[in-house]
Amino acid sequence: MRCSPRTSFAWLGVMLTLCAPSGLWAQDSEGPTPLYVIQPSDILEVFVWKEPDLSRRVLVRPDGRISFPLVQDLQAAGLTPAELKEKIEGLLKQFIASPNVTVIVEEIRNYRIYVTGKVNNPGSFTLEKPVTVLQALSLAGGFAEFASESDVKVVRTYGDQYMYLDFNYKDVIKGKNTEQNIVLRSGDVVVVP
């Protein structure tokens, strides 16, 4: 599917609205601040107040589940830390009168973006937090000689569908069409022709 810049960003808004819960960031209904969604390979610190034997550091397995004392295996990937906290508290109520759980995302290991084409250091980048297109280009060492700075594309996949988003570096650094400098989602590919 190929879209014009205006159509691309309108389509992106629709897709982000429809796909947010399964992505890396979910939208909070109270405002624009995104909530982190736990992913496989993340490391979580689960603290149970007044229960040091239950508090521990856990790895989210590739199947999206964690192992936790008393409650065994439970799904963590796809939930926000607050949702996982509520789930653990609900399961622990069978064993503890009033469990108070805190879930902290200690390490994000699943946010990976790719920059390819005419940049100085193409490759994949595993990061702790999301970056914009401009930041991704900087991580890749900037443009190589003869790069087409006005024709950069962001390739985003939704299942078996591809979306191509335009990014004009020259416009963005001049303060024009800055909405093109989107926050990249895990798996996005920035292509510099």
Image (tube, helix red, strand yellow):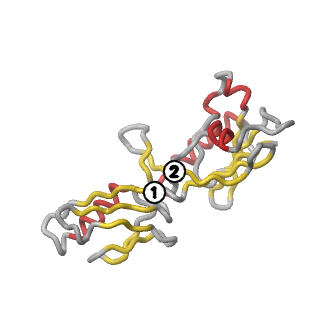
The residue positioned 82% from the left and 42% from the top of the image is 193
The residue positioned 82% from the left and 36% from the top of the image is 148
* Image quadrant assignment for residue 34: top left
- Residue under pointer 1: 107
Label 2–label 1 contact, CB within 8 A: yes
Q: Amino acid at mark 2?
A: Glu
Q: Nearer the viewer, residue 26 or 115?
A: 115
Task: Using a 10 Å C-alpha cutoff, classify the residue at mark 1 as few (fewer than 14 neighbours), some (14 to 19) or many (20 or more).
Answer: some
- Residue under pointer 2: 128
The residue positioned 24% from the left and 67% from the top of the image is 90
Residue 19's disc number: none
Left or right: 134 in relation to 75: right
Marked residue nearer the N-terminal end (2 or 1): 1
Rounded to the nearest angstrom, the CA distance separating label 2 from label 1 is: 7 Å
Residue 79, image x, y percentages: 41, 59
Q: Please, what secondary structure does the residue beneath circle 1 have? A: strand
The residue positioned 50% from the left and 65% from the top of the image is 41
Residue 68, image x, y percentages: 33, 73
